[in-house]
Image (cartoon, rainbow, N blue to C red):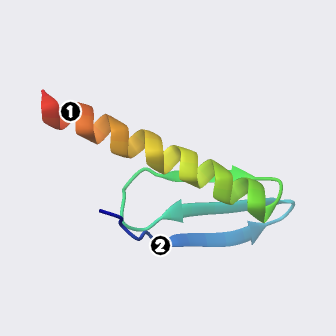
Amino acid sequence: MSAAYTAVIRKDGDWWIGWVQEVSGVNSQGATCEELLDNLREALGEAIEMNREDAAG
């Protein structure tokens, strides 16, 4: 099963900032858009794993 997520991305001065709309607390920044996307993927993966661990008890 694969899920789709929406990344909101903005340029703020020298930095790219973004967050995942569907998962509260998943946000990041990067010096490039590509770095930001990599950081968001990593943060999303960590959030999903933490949610799985919490659900398992």
Where, by quadrant of the figure, is residue 52 drawn? top left
At horizontal 52% and vertical 45% (from top left) the residue drawn is 43
Q: Position of residue 3 (x, y in %)?
A: 35, 66
Q: Secondary structure at mark 1?
A: helix
Task: Give whichever of 56, 23 is nearer the camera.
Answer: 56
At horizontal 87% and vertical 60% (from top left) the residue drawn is 14
The residue beneath circle 1 is 54
Label 2 crowd (10 A; few <14 / some 14-19 / many >=20):
few
Q: Secondary structure at mark 2?
A: loop
Task: Give whichever of 24, 6 is nearer the camera.
Answer: 6
Relative to 41, residue 57 above or below: above
Q: Quadrant for the N terminus, please.
A: bottom left
Q: Looking at this rendering, what residue extends furthest in the front direction?
A: 1
Q: Position of residue 35 (x, y in %)?
A: 75, 54
Relative to 2, residue 24 above or below: above
Label 1 crowd (10 A; few <14 / some 14-19 / many >=20):
few
CA gap between label 1 and label 2 equals 23 Å
Where, by quadrant of the figure, is residue 32 drawn? bottom right
Q: Quadrant for the C terminus, please.
A: top left
At horizontal 76% and vertical 70% (from top left) the residue drawn is 11
Q: Position of residue 51 (x, y in %)?
A: 27, 41
Task: Give whichever of 33, 3 is nearer the camera.
Answer: 3
Q: Looking at this rendering, what residue extends furthest in the right direction?
A: 14
Relative to 2, residue 43 above or below: above
Name the amino acid type tagged 1: Asp
Name the amino acid type tagged 2: Thr
Q: Earlier in the sequence, mark 1 or mark 2?
A: 2
Where, by quadrant of the figure, is residue 37 drawn? bottom right
The residue beneath circle 2 is 6
